Image (cartoon, helix red, strand yellow):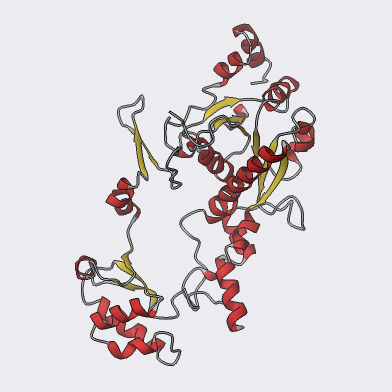
Amino acid sequence: MSKGALEGITVLDLSRLLPGPYASMILADHGARVIAIEDRRFAGEAMWGSSVNRNKEHMTLNLKSDRGRDIFFEMAASADVILEGFRPGVTKRLGVDYEAITKINPAIIYCSITGYGQSGPYRDVAGHDVNYLSVAGVLDLIGEAGKAPVIPGIQIADMAGGGMNAVIGILMAVVERHRTGKGQYIDISMTDGCFSLLTLAFMLQQLTGQRPKRSDFLLSHRYACYNTYETRDGRYLSIGAVENRFWKVLCAFFDAAEYTQYQYDDTRREEIIDFFRARFKEHPLSYWEEAFAGKDICWAPVKTMPEALADPLFHTREMVAEIQSAGDKPFKALGTPIKLSRTPGSVRTIPPEFGQDTRRILKQMGYSDADVEALEAAGAI
């Protein structure tokens, strides 16, 4: 049985932390052989043991040593993809940049994920998720009107801006290589990825001539039909009745049919929002869950993460994965959201220990026990 659509693709992952490992996790979930490579000096850092490294192998390699670099070149000669997340220029200093690899493997697909990209005035500037969201104009649109921007509780720049776009770029390059036999270089900027998320906000600005403001535009709290409301027990629910047919059902439920025609009326919007705020606060969330069941309104309870993890939806959709590990408790992870009918992705193995597969991989390459011990003594692995 196939391990997934990418079975037969080998990825050497030099990246660390979240963006690159998240990208290679997606590739590994769908059958690619992913060998994560790190220097031993990073052994104490927290990402190892995280579910982002499931389905992968891990080896230690010191790319600053000649022997470590030679081993990497040997591996790269037969690899399909190299993924890295260093600052611009680091791989060149290490001697493992795209130009160096293409001399031994012209068909290599080489993907670099950085904060601001390989070109432009910010290429050498340090940053993290919140900084990339800030520069891209995304953070300014998150939070309450008139208050400070709110940092999201998830890593949008790392995962959506960087990791997902890296996967898209790699898969595009794989398809193109199948057609031409040629590899290519992929430059992924997390900030570019965040900037592209402004698509709808930018479109609305072009249509209305008005700059979208935090919690004050069409799909962000400006109107009652697309908003969040507190319930009597301090919980929240969301209303997304964008189309008038859904809005009409909601208004009818509250015996407020007169509001149906004023869905996007700026002269009545605050009055209508206040009306729904007051009504939703009359009952706890559980009441609304029962009252709205089966009604075509476009509503949802705002769930906590534990509640979402327990939701039958995600268990039915195999989005909560569980595999038996060597410990007492099974290993739990989030599943893969891309559902392929013939070659589905899956969570097959738990995250490896740091450097766990170093010896096995080197032996597969033809190194003897004595060779491995010598490499270890020399600091190459």
Q: 134 and 7: which one is in front?
A: 7
Please identify the quarter of the rendering in which residue 358 is found.
top right
Q: Position of residue 244 (x, y in %)?
A: 38, 80
Q: Position of residue 161 (x, y in %)?
A: 58, 54
Please identify the quarter of the rendering in which residue 280 is found.
bottom left
Q: Where is 24 relative to 149, above or below? A: above
Q: Where is 130 relative to 107, above or below? A: below
Q: Where is 143 relative to 374, above or below? A: below
Report the side of 280 relative to 341 (left or right): left
Taking the view exactly as shown, the residue that stands out farthest to the front is: 179
Q: What residue lies at 37% left-to-right and 45% top-to-bottom?
A: 319
Q: Position of residue 301 (x, y in %)?
A: 30, 64
Q: Where is 47 relative to 165, above or below? A: above
The answer, for residue 95, to whether it is visible in the render is no
Report the side of 236 relative to 219 (left or right): left
The answer, for residue 194, to whether it is visible in the render is yes
Q: 33 and 236: which one is in front?
A: 33
Quadrant of the image for the C terminus? top right
Q: What residue lies at 43% left-to-right and 45% top-to-bottom?
A: 339
Total numbered circles: 0
Q: Position of residue 220 (x, y in %)?
A: 46, 74
Q: What residue lies at 65% left-to-right and 29% top-to-bottom?
A: 79
Quadrant of the image for the N terminus? top left
